[in-house]
Image (tube, rainbow, N blue to C red):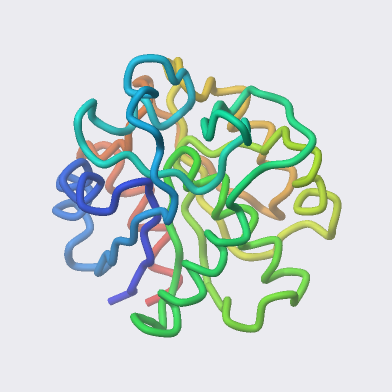
Amino acid sequence: TSRTRRKHTNGNSFREKTGALRKLLKKQVELVYISAPHQVPAIQNETNQGPEKTASGGDEDQRGWWFSDVQARSFNAQQECESSLGLEESIETVKTAVKELGPFDGILGFSQGAALVAMLCALQEQKLEADFNFRFAILVAGFCSVCSQHRRFYEGPAITIPSLHVFGQDDRVIPEEMSRDLLPAFDGAQILVHPGGHFVPAASSHRQTYQDFLKKFE
């Protein structure tokens, strides 16, 4: 059974949202969840148009991996910025989790968490973080950060870590083309396209794709 580190803004809420996926893959993977280190101001429940507005509920503890608007402490995947706030702390959060809860075979992220997974894979590929030794990555509704400070993650060699990229054709938060723009960063990326929106698909029709991908790491 593979152990997979799962990344999302709020680990507890995401555990509930991925119940169908856990059931779908219960014979193959054990999922371990962590929450992002940064609390998102409550006002964003109404105004934030970034990925985590749809991914998280309205009243729960909203968390983020980094902020694209440093002053407002907000995040929008399509907001271009020179520098971000909080990314280094998030990388440290994952490193701590790997040390204390690992080892893990793979890493899975959703939305901003998937964008972070791509960055962590780049660090591993460039041998810049000895603590990361993931054998595979699953990125659901991932995207390339448009923050200038993050270009370094996409300018290095292609990431050779086996990856499965999952995205919805009707995703209004992270449009399909944004997820496709991330594919060239990975060598031999596999994809799973579903007709739905901004969620982790786990219908019986998706089981074979997940299982075939994970089978290689058993």
Residue 59: x and y in percent read 19, 30
| Residue 204 placement: quadrant | top left
Q: Of residues 96 and 4, which is closer to you in this image?
A: 96
Q: Of residues 155 and 88, which is closer to you in this image?
A: 88
Left or right: where 127 falls relative to 32: right
Residue situated furthest front in the rendering: 71
In the displayed structure, 103 sits above or below 119; it is below
Residue 171: x and y in percent read 43, 20
Residue 78: x and y in percent read 63, 23
Which part of the image, by quadrant, shows the C terminus? bottom left
Q: Residue at x 41, y 74 (%)?
A: 97
Q: Of residues 40 and 189, which is closer to you in this image?
A: 40
| Residue 30 placement: quadrant | bottom left
Q: Of residues 13 and 199, which is closer to you in this image?
A: 13
Residue 153: x and y in percent read 75, 53
Q: Residue at x 73, y 36 (%)?
A: 147
In the displayed structure, 171 sits above or below 114; it is above
Q: Residue at x 54, y 39 (%)?
A: 142
Left or right: where 66 falls relative to 99: right
In the displayed structure, 28 sits above or below 85; it is below
Left or right: where 88 falls relative to 103: right
How many numbered marks are there? 0
Which part of the image, by quadrant, shows the N terminus? bottom left
Left or right: where 4 falls relative to 188: left
